[in-house]
Image (cartoon, helix red, strand yellow):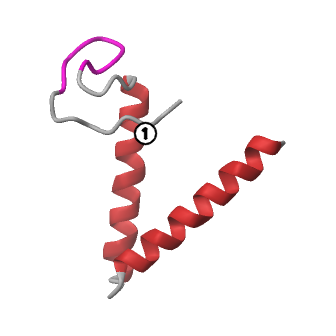
Amino acid sequence: MKFSPCTGDCTSNKKRCGGCGRSRDEITETQLITKQLVEHLVKYNYSDPENFLENVTKKAIKRSKNAEKK
């Protein structure tokens, strides 16, 4: 499945957003992950948040590829 980011054209369809096509559960989980990342950035007040997020991205991709192999 390919990720479909928010288009800003949200709809109130019961199971899926008509704008991005994602399920309500996926949207909720993505918002939670984003909130947790922001809280972490604020808590530790990194002077280089881009570096932190790049590192997290690389690790997440590597770990997801390893999990797919199992």
Q: Which residue is drawn at 84% across and 42% down?
A: 70
View extreme (front): residue: 2
Q: Say left or right for 27 vs 60.
A: left
For label 1, the SS is helix
Q: Which residue lies furthest to the left in this view?
A: 9
User: Looking at the rendering, which quadrant does residue 6 occupy?
Assistant: top left
Q: What residue type is labelled 1?
A: Glu
Q: In this view, does 63 lie above or below 21?
A: below
Q: What stretch is highlighted in magenta?
A: 10-18
Q: Is the magenta stretch mostly helix, strand or loop?
A: loop
What is the x, y in percent for residue 44?
38, 81
Point 76% across, 52% down: residue = 66
Identify which residue, 6 or 29, lies in the foreground: 6
Query: Quick check: 41 above or below 21?
Result: below
Location of residue 69 in the rendering, given as x and y in whole percent from the top left corner: 81, 44
Outermost residue toward the top in this view? 14
- How packed mark 1 is, by other alpha carbons closer than 10 Å (few <14, some 14-19, many 20 or more), is few
Horizontal and vertical percent for residue 50? 37, 75
Residue highlighted by disc 1: 29
| Residue lying at 39% horizontally and 47% vertically, measured from the top left | 32
Taking the spot 36% from the left edge, 73% from the top edge, the residue there is 41
Q: Give the quarter of the image for residue 53.
A: bottom left
Name of the residue lying farthest toward the bottom: 47
Task: Report x, y in % for residue 63.
Answer: 69, 56
* Numbered-mark total: 1
Question: Is 33 part of what is drawn in magenta?
Answer: no
Residue 39 position (above or below residue 63)? below
Left/right placement of residue 45 relative to residue 19 reads: right
